[in-house]
């Protein structure tokens, strides 16, 4: 199973060429149309497409007064493990999640779409991946397919909203990550276990989790996000874990390593030197030598007797979009 091969390449390029990217104004579009490079007085949204729905987060669909409403993750900030939170992968994941809507200073690829659909009448939420959408204003649909041995479909779980606050124990979820804008492409599959959305707040109009960071972005920098000032202020958390065995089946082709080796941070010690992909070394009994920071059996911090997983942590913001159902 391949993992972020394209993301790593793009991430390394971003490290080497960040200055030139900033000069191109990709993240903001400084003119009033959101696509130019002329600095503005502020980073507030002004394009009618971006302000048609009154919201704090560039909502594209008005959820006000709706009892069933959907949002798409507008930003996903990985916080752990450190190697995934770093610029080589973490930044590029964020770029893939950021919507492809230049008019609204959102210059992402929009190929990694994660939806949450709340139903306040039943106190539930449906969450899962969506197909890439060339035009985000047309809405999104939940993926329902099978890739290899992995069934990919949205999961419905209890998620009552009380005074705007919500938590949701999602459980096991296969996250589809598309490589490009082609909705017919085969996604990378990332198996998350015991996923949980927590400490979330939905705005009173049901349009936002978190908010657009207009005041934190610099017009002189074309309203580009940087390491200190993100495009959005996150409004919820995500936790999950991935087992080391599964990480070893996730292959980063362009680095010639499995995710397991990458998570080790020490390919010389933990990699088997395989060609074309170096996987994690195993002992005589077939067990992977690398020890994680998490225990899958207890879903808690690793102990001396259980170190078979790595915890994933992230924060996210989300904006209202039209959810059209399950993809045909």
Image (spheres, rainbow, N blue to C red):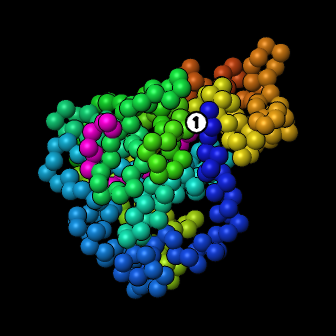
Is residue 313 magenta-colored?
yes
The quadrant the C terminus occupies is top left
Q: Is residue 290 left or right of residue 327?
A: right
Q: Nearer the viewer, residue 130 or 291?
A: 130
Helix, strand, or loop for circle 1? strand
Kindly identify the residue that appears in the image at 54 percent across and 26 percent down.
Answer: 148
Query: Which residue is labeled 1 in the image?
Result: 311
Q: From the viewer's side, name the closer residue of 268 and 299.
A: 268
Q: Residue 293: in sight, yes or no?
A: no
Residue 6: % across, % down: 62, 50
User: Residue at image x 28%, y 69%?
Assistant: 49
Question: Does the stretch in magenta take in 21?
Answer: no
Residue segment shown in magenta: 311-328
For residue 129, which quarter of the picture? Answer: top left
Instruction: Tell me: 188 left or right of 236.
Output: right
Where residue 206 appears, as percent x and y from the top left, is 23, 52
Q: Tell me which residue sits at (19%, 32%) in the image.
A: 122
Q: Is residue 156 visible?
A: yes
Secondary structure mostly seen in the magenta stretch:
strand
The crowding category of the residue bearing disc 1, from other C-alpha atoms within 10 Å (few below 14, some 14 to 19, many at least 20), is many
Q: Report which quarter residue 4 is drawn in.
A: top right
């Amino acid at each position: 199973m391949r993992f972020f091969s394209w993301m790593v390449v793009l991430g390394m390029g971003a490290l080497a060429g960040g200055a030139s990217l900033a000069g191109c104004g990709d993240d903001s579009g400084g003119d009033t149309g959101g696509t130019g490079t002329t600095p503005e007085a502020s980073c507030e949204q002004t394009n009618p497409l971006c302000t048609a729905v009154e919201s704090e987060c560039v909502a594209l669909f008005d959820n006000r007064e709706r009892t069933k409403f959907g949002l798409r993750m507008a930003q996903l900030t990985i916080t752990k493990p450190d190697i995934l939170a770093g610029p080589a992968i973490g930044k590029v994941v964020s770029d893939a999640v950021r919507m492809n809507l230049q008019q609204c200073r959102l210059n992402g690829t929009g190929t990694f779409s994660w939806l949450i659909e709340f139903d306040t009448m039943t106190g539930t939420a449906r969450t899962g991946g969506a197909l890439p959408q060339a035009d985000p204003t047309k809405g999104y649909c939940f993926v329902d397919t099978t890739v290899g041995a992995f069934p990919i479909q949205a999961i419905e779980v209890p998620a009552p909203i009380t005074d705007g606050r919500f938590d949701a124990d999602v459980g096991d979820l296969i996250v589809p990550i598309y490589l490009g804008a082609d909705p017919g492409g085969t996604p990378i599959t990332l198996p998350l276990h015991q996923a949980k959305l927590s400490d979330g707040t939905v705005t009173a109009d049901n349009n936002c989790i978190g908010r657009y960071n207009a005041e934190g972005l610099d017009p002189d920098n074309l309203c580009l996000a940087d390491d200190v000032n993100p495009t959005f202020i996150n409004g919820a958390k995500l936790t999950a874990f991935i087992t080391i065995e599964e990480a070893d089946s996730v292959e980063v082709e362009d680095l010639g390593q499995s995710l397991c080796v990458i998570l080790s941070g020490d390919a010389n010690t933990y990699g088997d030197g395989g060609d074309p992909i170096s996987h994690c070394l195993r002992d005589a009994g077939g067990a992977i030598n690398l020890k994680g920071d998490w225990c899958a059996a207890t879903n808690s911090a690793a102990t001396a007797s259980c170190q078979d997983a790595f915890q994933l942590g992230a924060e996210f913001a989300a904006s209202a979009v039209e959810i059209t159902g399950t993809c045909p």
